[in-house]
Image (cartoon, helix red, strand yellow):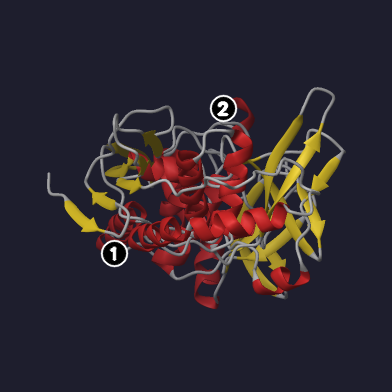
Amino acid sequence: MKKILINLSIGIILLSNSLVGKTADPRVTLEKPKGNPQVVVHFYQVRVLIQPPNLEGIVFQRELNDPNFEAMISTISSRLESVHKVLHRVADSLRLSEWWRFQLYLQAAKSIEVNDERVSHVLLALLEKTPFNATLVQESTNQKNIRSLALAIKEKLFFASNLEYMNSYFYLIDIKSGKFHTLSSTQVEMLPISQEKMNRKRPMDLRVTDMPDFGGATIKKEWIWRSGGKLYALKGEISQLKMAFYAAYPQRDLPTYFDMIFGESLFSLADSLASIIQKEKKSSIEALQFLHDFVTYALPYKEDKATERGEHCSFAEETLFDEYSDCEDRTILLALLYKKILKIRPIILEYKDHVSLAIPISKADLEQFTIAKEKNNKMTLLKFESKDYLPIDPSFFNSTIGEINPLFSKRKTERIFFVP
């Protein structure tokens, strides 16, 4: 196995094709070598050696309203300058999104301090060196006080509580798990943020515009489905770490999942599907049906509430390799396949408890549609902004494109939006 060593001022980044150490979370582990003051943060395929900073002499304030609290954070931040430089280089080398940059900083804070309260101090001090706006929140319950990080996010999140402060929304993050969580108390104390800091900092952007180079073991899958009376089969694989990356990502608003980069596995599949369409000289309507059939029948269906993971939205590439998918996952994947392969920009039809799509019909396709409708009178068209759209539902089994599930035919949509 080839390894690349990069010498840094206080640590070493070790890039390899496998993750060292085992844990319940395959993305991150901590290691403290015996007789060595350094600690090691394993982050995906990277080992980061950190020399803990000298925090001696710092009086750790416990109360957020203590007048010396901000000065304490500033002092800790100055002692962490070299640590921040290493973490910044690691994040850049891995091409981490802003969310996973934060996760790297969180793991580093945990490696430097053990006490939960002090971890929160170190984490906030590390974030002082980033552009992200963050503070600390303390929730008071009958049993104890719960310390959380409040991180400004520029978009709507699900399954998380937020606090509005100076026209920004701060979402609460459990420092132990690194995940967003909901408030357990109405008694909340927040460390104030100065107007100068609010102007200097910004909310975190959760868009995924790039991907780390994931290595290690892979998940292999074969997709088998029928379309037009013919049996098809394709194969693909994806890094286990990449699937862990997807599964741990914050749950965002539905439209954001249609504005994502294509992962390598999804690119490869799209190319294979496009090759079949071209080789078999499928018409526009036939190509639409072919891709619909792939998503509908090659991927096992199960509603989120019946799965161990529960309610969630999946990335398109994640859906390909997940054990199950439901309506929004399938719609995201099919819409992006239509966009990539057929150069079509669908609209998304969002109901209270269902998601499907529709694609614009050109004059040439309208003639094909008319011929197809003579064989299937259930096919119909929708009007949106004075244009004709063909409804398509990859969760409506034993149906063709142009059919609307009777369960939703008389229901009003809550939202209609274009795929970017």
Residue placed farthest to the left in the image?
1
Residue 126, given in percent of the width and then of the height, sits at 54, 55
Label placed on residue 307: 2
Residue at image position (49%, 66%) is: 368
Tell me how far mark 2 sits from mark 1, CA to CA. 37 Å
- Does the rendering let one see residue 229? no
Extreme residue in the right direction: 186
Q: In the image, what residue type sits under mark 2?
A: Thr
* Amino acid bearing label 1: Gln
Circle nearer the N terminus (2, 1) = 1
Which residue does the image show at 59% across and 57% down from the upper left?
75
Label 1 neighbour load within 10 Å: few <14, some 14-19, many 20+: few
The quarter of the rendered structure image containing the N terminus is top left
Q: Is residue 135 visible?
A: yes
Mark 2 vs mark 1: in front: 2
Where is mark 1, residue-wise?
Answer: 278
Q: Which mark is residue 129?
A: none
Q: Secondary structure at mark 2?
A: loop
**Where does residue 96 sit, x and y in percent of width and height?**
42, 58
In the rendered view, tell whether residue 8 sits above or below residue 173.
below
